[in-house]
């Protein structure tokens, strides 16, 4: 399935049905009086966050969504049928943005969360509503309210606990493949990862979600490489895991480059808790490891850890460090303990 995290959508709610002008015309009833019914309500356009989706690809093939119009009122005091609502089903983590691409209308962060973004028009009153002692045969009715048309943007920001950062070929996808069931593409050339990937990682009987995004390079905030278009997918993360390629030749420079791009992106991304890890230590001897760790510690915030995604050396310690930075209420999955408090069988 192709990944799509931004879509432009055109929506229109349903118009209300018009009220009816009608009079009773029954045999042997001399003064029947008005009996025009009201028009039906127009349908709403609703956006709902559902489970099982992780892309907005459905909105590439359909961009126009119209709710049903309300039916006109009829005689014999019959109210018109309400128009059908139009529901747009989106992944959890989708932001609804106004046409100006700046105003956030809603942020759907929970399964089942719904928001009405275009309310249907009210149905018009029939002439029965205008009957009075001084106007017993009213010949007026209200038209239904008009539909609301608007253009919105849907932007997906994946929900994850840990976000992976690093230069291209820093080993982010290898780490995700080694610690989870995710199978991102891994190769020996830059920008192997073109779209974000999610993986569920387990350590010490708890599980959390890790997001891998395409690598950043110097000038990403100016659009170089794949730019910083995917940094929005780690905005919701509790902690960032910054992987440094130990074989790059200038690990300290790579670290400063990524930090600079985070600061240029804005928001509080640069202020999030960040764990710095020297990766690919399987290709380094003890002396090189110690030298590079000291070099990174001089420019990094906090301690520097070592790891190899290929040999899995140090991965458990890194996962435990990430777990310590994640609040308990953010852990989505827990592995049930085989031993229960009450082992006796119950019918």
Image (tube, helix red, strand yellow):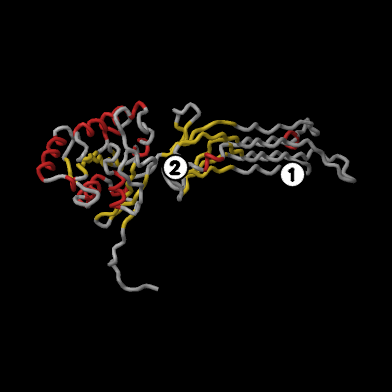
Q: Residue at x 45, y 50 (%)?
A: 52
Q: Categorize mark 1 by other alpha carbons within 10 Å: few (<14), some (14-19), many (20+).
A: some
The mark found on residue 78 in the picture is: 1
Q: Residue at x 90, y 45 (%)?
A: 28
Q: Nearer the viewer, residue 75 or 300?
A: 300
Q: Is residue 87 left or right of residue 251?
A: right
Q: Quick one: which residue is furthest to the front in this view?
A: 188
The mark found on residue 28 in the picture is: none
The mark found on residue 3 in the picture is: 2
Q: Examine the image and state in which quarter residue 165 appears.
A: top left
Q: Do the residues bearing badges 1 and 2 touch, measured as CB atoms within 8 Å? A: no
Q: Nearer the viewer, residue 71 or 2?
A: 2
Spatial CA span between label 1 and label 2: 48 Å
**Residue 96: where, in percent of width, then height?**
47, 35
Q: Categorize mark 2 by other alpha carbons within 10 Å: few (<14), some (14-19), many (20+).
A: few
Element marked by disc 1: loop
Q: Quick one: which residue is furthest to the left in this view?
A: 287
Element marked by disc 2: loop
- The reply to whether residue 307 is in sight is yes
Q: Residue at x 18, y 46 (%)?
A: 283
- Marker count (numbered): 2
Q: Quick one: which residue is furthest to the right in this view?
A: 28
Q: Nearer the viewer, residue 87 or 317?
A: 317
**Residue 149: where, in percent of width, then height?**
59, 31
Comes first in the chain, label 1 or label 2: 2
Q: Is residue 302 left or right of residue 137?
A: left
Q: Is residue 79 left or right of residue 247?
A: right
- The reply to whether residue 95 is in sight is no
**Residue 271: where, in percent of width, then height?**
26, 33
């Amino acid at each position: 399935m192709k990944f799509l995290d931004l879509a432009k959508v055109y929506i229109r709610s349903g118009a209300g049905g018009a009220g009816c002008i009608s009079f009773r015309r029954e045999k042997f009833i001399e003064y029947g009086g008005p009996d025009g019914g009201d028009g039906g309500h127009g349908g709403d356009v609703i956006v709902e966050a559902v489970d099982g989706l992780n892309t907005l690809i459905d909105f590439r093939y359909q961009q126009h969504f119209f709710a049903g119009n309300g039916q006109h009122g009829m005689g014999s005091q019959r109210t018109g049928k309400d128009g059908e609502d139009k529901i747009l089903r989106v992944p959890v983590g989708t932001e609804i943005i106004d046409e100006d691409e700046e105003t956030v209308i809603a942020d759907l962060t929970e399964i089942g969360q719904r928001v009405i973004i275009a309310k249907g028009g009210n149905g018009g009153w029939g002439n029965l509503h205008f009957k009075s002692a001084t106007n017993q045969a009213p010949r007026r009715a209200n038209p239904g309210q008009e539909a609301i048309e608007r253009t919105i943007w849907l932007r997906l920001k994946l929900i994850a606990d840990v976000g992976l950062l690093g230069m291209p070929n820093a080993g982010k996808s290898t780490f995700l493949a080694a610690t989870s069931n995710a199978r991102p593409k891994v190769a020996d050339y830059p920008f192997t990862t073109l779209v974000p990937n999610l993986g569920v990682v387990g350590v010490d009987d708890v599980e959390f979600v890790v997001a891998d995004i395409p690598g950043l390079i110097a000038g990403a905030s100016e659009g170089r490489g794949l730019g910083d278009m995917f940094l929005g997918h780690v905005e919701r993360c509790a902690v960032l895991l910054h992987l440094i390629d130990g074989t790059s030749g200038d690990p300290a420079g790579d670290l400063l480059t990524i930090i600079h791009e985070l600061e240029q992106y804005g928001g509080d991304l640069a202020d999030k808790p960040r764990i710095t890890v020297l990766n690919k230590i399987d290709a380094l001897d003890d002396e090189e490891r110690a030298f590079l760790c000291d070099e990174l510690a001089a420019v990094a915030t906090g301690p520097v850890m070592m790891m190899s995604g290929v040999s899995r050396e140090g991965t458990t310690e890194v996962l435990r460090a990430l777990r310590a930075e994640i609040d308990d209420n953010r852990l989505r999955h827990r592995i049930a303990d085989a031993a229960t408090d009450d082992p006796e069988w119950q019918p």
